[in-house]
Amino acid sequence: MKKNLFTAFKIAFFVGVGIFFIWLFMRNLTIQERHDIVRSFREANYFWIILSIFIGILSHISRTIRWKMLLEPMGYKPGFRNTFLAVFIGYFANLALPRLGEISRCGVLAKYENIPLQKAFGTVVTERGLDLLTFAAAFLINLVVHFGKLGLFRETSIYRSAVGKYREFEYPGLMAWLIIAIIASLAFLLFKSRRRIAHTYVYRKFRDIILGFIEGLKTLLNVRRPLLFIFHSLFIWLMYLLMTWVVFFCLPETANLGLDVGLAVFVFGTIGIMVIQGGIGIYPWIVAESLAIFGIMETKGYAVGWLLWSGQTITIILAGIISLMLLPVVNQPQNGKAGIGKVQDTIR
């Protein structure tokens, strides 16, 4: 009875966390914005939203496989199930705090596959570097494809706001320089006194973290199937593009827009998600501004933006909650397996 009550409590807790996130996103919206969400949901053809979610899941599967490929050169072969759930938990955690997801998904593998946190984190940093390069390529392709519309883009409030933000941070303030000076001074003092403190636990722990981090970064050079690795790196972002474009078919006003328009919305929307955690509030606005360049009414563009953002965010929340609940269940000791990663780490 106690076990059943505890299980019910865990389920209720995780569902409550999901509801809290939905409330957190909705509480600052105006009445008009909420009305736009309701209207867009009424007009939408849900088939295309479901298809977009399915395409997104394909990208997450591909990311799981690519992450496993980065871990293999270090001698770790985590199970697909735990790695897949860890990826979803990472996305879920990133909705709360920036970069929390990277640590969270590494923590999952540390707990259930016995992969050192610092080594797994090194591979995640490698992943992020590859993602940044791929996005940079997509951004350049978008500029080439829509070169003739650059003048129109400069007239949007997206461009004006971005320029304003750049000017605000063009000259760092005194506090920023002070923080940089303090960090540099501490790093210098640590380096100069490394021999004196080499025997301390804190120093050894810090050294192990740095070495494990570097080892994780080196895995990119030792990937066993480089062509397959490149395929997954491209496939992930192609799926991101397609999951954005197919939502255009939800409304008749945007159903005739081509993949080139989907590329523009995808690129600018991704920038919004990078700037504001989870794209809260800014993502639908960016989509509306981007579609306005191609002659779509602002209200319809705003509706598409909310459909895109809501579908992606709700999927991440639900998948994250389910993943958190499933991890303890699929890793129960009575399953008879401790995880390949744990066995290999013990042998080593």
Image (cartoon, grey):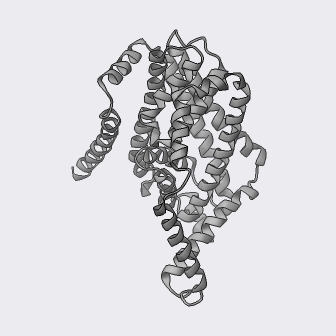
**At x 28% / y 45%, what residue is drawn?**
13
Residue 195's place in the image compared with 151, above or below, is below
Rendering coords of residue 166 (x, y %): 55, 44
Count every numbered label the image shows and give the total: 0
Which quadrant, please, contains the C terminus? bottom right
What is the quadrant of residue 125 in the picture?
Answer: bottom right
Q: Is residue 199 left or right of residue 225?
A: left
Rendering coords of residue 309 (x, y %): 46, 30
Looking at this view, name the residue that lies furthest to the top: 252
Residue 327's place in the image compared with 239, above or below, is below
Q: Is residue 328 visible?
A: yes
**At x 62% / y 29%, what residue is drawn?**
241
Residue 79's place in the image compared with 116, above or below, is above
What is the quadrant of residue 235 in the picture?
Answer: top right
Rendering coords of residue 44 (x, y %): 45, 15
Q: Is residue 347 visible?
A: no
**At x 50% / y 15%, what residue is drawn?**
250
Instruction: Return the residue nearer the eye: 184 or 66.
Output: 184
Instruction: Return the residue nearer the eye: 107 or 312.
Output: 312
Instruction: Return the residue nearer the eye: 277 or 70.
Output: 277
